[in-house]
Each structure stands twice: as C-alpha cells, then as structure tokens.
Amino acid sequence: MALHFELVTPERLVRSEEVHMVVVPGAEGDFGVLEGHSPMMSTLRDDAVLQVWTSAGGAPETITVAGGFAEVSGKGLTVLAESAA
Amino acid sequence: MASLKALKIRINSVKSTQKITKAMKMVAAAKLKRAQEAAEASRPYAERLEAVVSSIASKVSVGPQSPKLLAGSGKDQVHLFVVATSDKGLAGAFNTNIVRLARRRALELQAEGKTVKFYTIGKKGKDQLARTFRNDIVHMVEPGDLGKLGFEQVRDWGADLTARFEAGEFDVAHLFFSKFVSVLTQEPTEIQLMPVALSNDNAPAGAAASVDYEPDEEEILADLLPRNVAVQLLRAQRENAASEQGSKMTAMDNATRNAGDMINKLTIQYNRTRQAAITTELVEIISGAEAL
C-alpha cells in the first residue's frame, strides 16, 4: 500500500520514507505515482513543485525542486534534484 | 657550545610551534568529521545518477547524432587533466601525491605522442605542475575552503568543461583527486570524466526493458550527462576535502610529536650546559682558595 519515496540532492539524502502518493511535475506533464506504478523515467520541470501525500486523504506536503529527474522502478520512486526546499 | 640564553630562547620557540601544530591538529580533526559526513552524504546521489546514466546509455545506440559526452569525439589525441588539489599547504603529502600521479600519467601519454593539457583546481596543484608543464595549463580555478564549496560553484566548472569539450578543445578528460579511505590512508585516484566511462555491470538487463521514458532516451541523456560531469566534480571535491583534513591531521600530529622530541633534546642540552658552567665556576673558586 505504501510507496517508497526517496529525494536525493548532491548535498545529501533529503528524504527516504514510505508515502501514499507523490505527484511529480514531469517535463511533459504532471503524473501521480502510487505503489506498483510501471517503471518509467522522466526529467522534471525547473523549479517545479513536488506534492507528497503521506497518507490517503489530507493535504499534500509540497517540496520545490530544481533541476530534477525522477525514476520509478520496482523499488519505488527516486527523485534526483540539484536542490530541494 | 650555545649559550644558556640562546638555548632557552630556542626551547621556548619550539614550544610555541608545538602549541600551534597541536591546535592545527585539533582543528583538522573537527573539520575532518564534517568533511567526512559531507563526502558520505554526497555518495547516494552520485551512485544513483551513475546507475541511471549507464542503464539509459546501454539502451541508446551510439551514432553520429548521439551526445558528444557519450560518444566522444572519435579521437584520442588531446587529453585534458583536471587536477583537483587544495589551495592550502601544511597537509603532508596530500597535494604532492595527487600531482605526482597526474605528472606520471602525463609523461606516459606524452611518450605515446599525445598532447596533454591541464585544468587545475586549487593553487597548490597549479604551482607544482607549473614547474614541469608551465605552458600546458589552460585554465585554473581556486576553490577556496574545500569544506564550504557548494554545488552551484562546481556546476559552473562542469559547464565550463563541457563547453570546452563541445568546442573540441580536447578529446578525453581525466579527473585527478585524492580518495578518502581512512584518516591514515588517502589514495590519489584517476577517473575518466569525459566521455562518460560506462560500467556495464550495474545496468539491469531484462528488468528495465519496459521502462517508459519522458521525453525520450536521447533527450534525458542530453540533460543528464552534463549533470553527471558536475556531480563527479563535486564528488572529487568532497573526497578531497576529507582527504585534506585527514592528511593535515596526521601531518600535524607528527609535527607535534617531533616538536616534543626536540624540546626533550634541547632541555637535556640546556641542563648539561648549565651543569658545566656550575662545575667550571666551582673549580675556579676552589683552585683560587687553594692558591692562597
């Protein structure tokens, strides 16, 4: 039920946790990632906002990322970004 | 024989040197901890990026349209050595070891008839390389305090290097830095920076076959490869920062110990001289009394 979400910048590993859903601002449009999403890779728009739902329902947590890249694999979602705030 | 006063001054001066080296050792130890943490914190990003780059690169066929950073210029004539050292000395053989490795490789390549150019990061490396390769240094940057270096700064160097590569200034770039193994061991290391050296062993062959790419593979790669250069540079800086402090700590520990030995030796000499002076004085008094 949970998606493993990792957010990594060159400086440090910002996040590594189980979440419900993440909406990723891909270069060709936003996409939501739930557990069991098919493998994909996408670059992110610059200074875009990542929305993280830690549980179903409730308000999402937002993280602004710059210069990013997202990879969805069997292990979960990994976002590589040059900066995250 | 040195006079008592001269010896006393000498002892005091060695003592204050010892105090300084001891303080420097403690500062290095404190900085080392932070540098080591920073080096470890930057590893996950570098590792993931490398894995992603090699898994995409293994699927893209190299052709004339593929990014230059992946395919290379098709030649092997001009080599650029990016030598990362520090701006400051007093760190044992830290800078010298990196330069020595770079110089050895440069002479090897020159013997094969290749052209070698240098792009130095850090004042110390530049000074040492200028002795042998004064005219081959194309550019130099001074990073300042390695521990405080941010990604933005490194990214600019990466962009500069990529631009030079695209302009055809060189065919292959190598990066030299010191890998932090432990406080006592730092290994001068060489990696190929451009074109990207691919390790095929960590690319999952079958599992990744059905991955969707957005936009397509080539565009992602064109975006990722320059970033990979910057990340490799950052990694080298972080490793260097930790190595520098480790090396400095060891060097200052040795210096403190040497100063201690020197103080002991000088103290013995001081005491002997003083004793000799007393004995001479006594002999003079006694023989003077006997003569009466």
Image (cartoon, coloured by chain):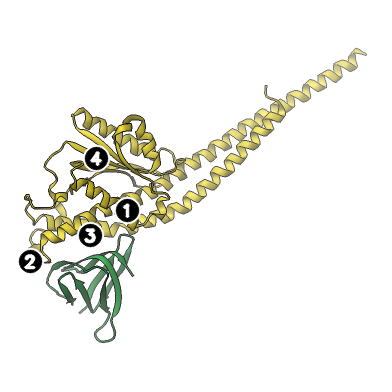
Chain colours: A green, B yellow
Q: Mark 4 lies on which chain?
A: B
Q: Which chain carries label 2?
A: B
Label 3 – label 4 distance at C-alpha: 26 Å
Left/right of residue B252 with respect to residue B17 in the rendered view: left
* Depicted B286 relative to depicted B204: above or below: above
Going from N to C along the chain, the mark reached first, 3 or 4, is 3
| Quadrant in which the N terminus of chain B appears | top right
Left/right of residue B92 with respect to residue B104 in the rendered view: right
Q: Residue furthest right?
A: B292
Q: Do labels 2 and 3 share a chain?
A: yes
Mark 4 belongs to which amino acid? Leu
Mark 3 belongs to which amino acid? Arg
Label 2 – label 3 distance at C-alpha: 19 Å
Q: Name the residue under label 3.
A: B48
| Quadrant in which the C terminus of chain B appears | top right
Instruction: Provide the secondary structure element on which disc 2 rests.
Output: helix
Mark 1 belongs to which amino acid? Val
Label 3 – label 1 distance at C-alpha: 19 Å
Q: Name the residue under label 1.
A: B154
Q: Which numbered marker is on residue B210?
A: 2
Q: Name the residue under label 4.
A: B80
Question: Would residue B203 be seen by someone viewing this image from the given angle?
Answer: no
Going from N to C along the chain, the mark reached first, 2 or 1, is 1
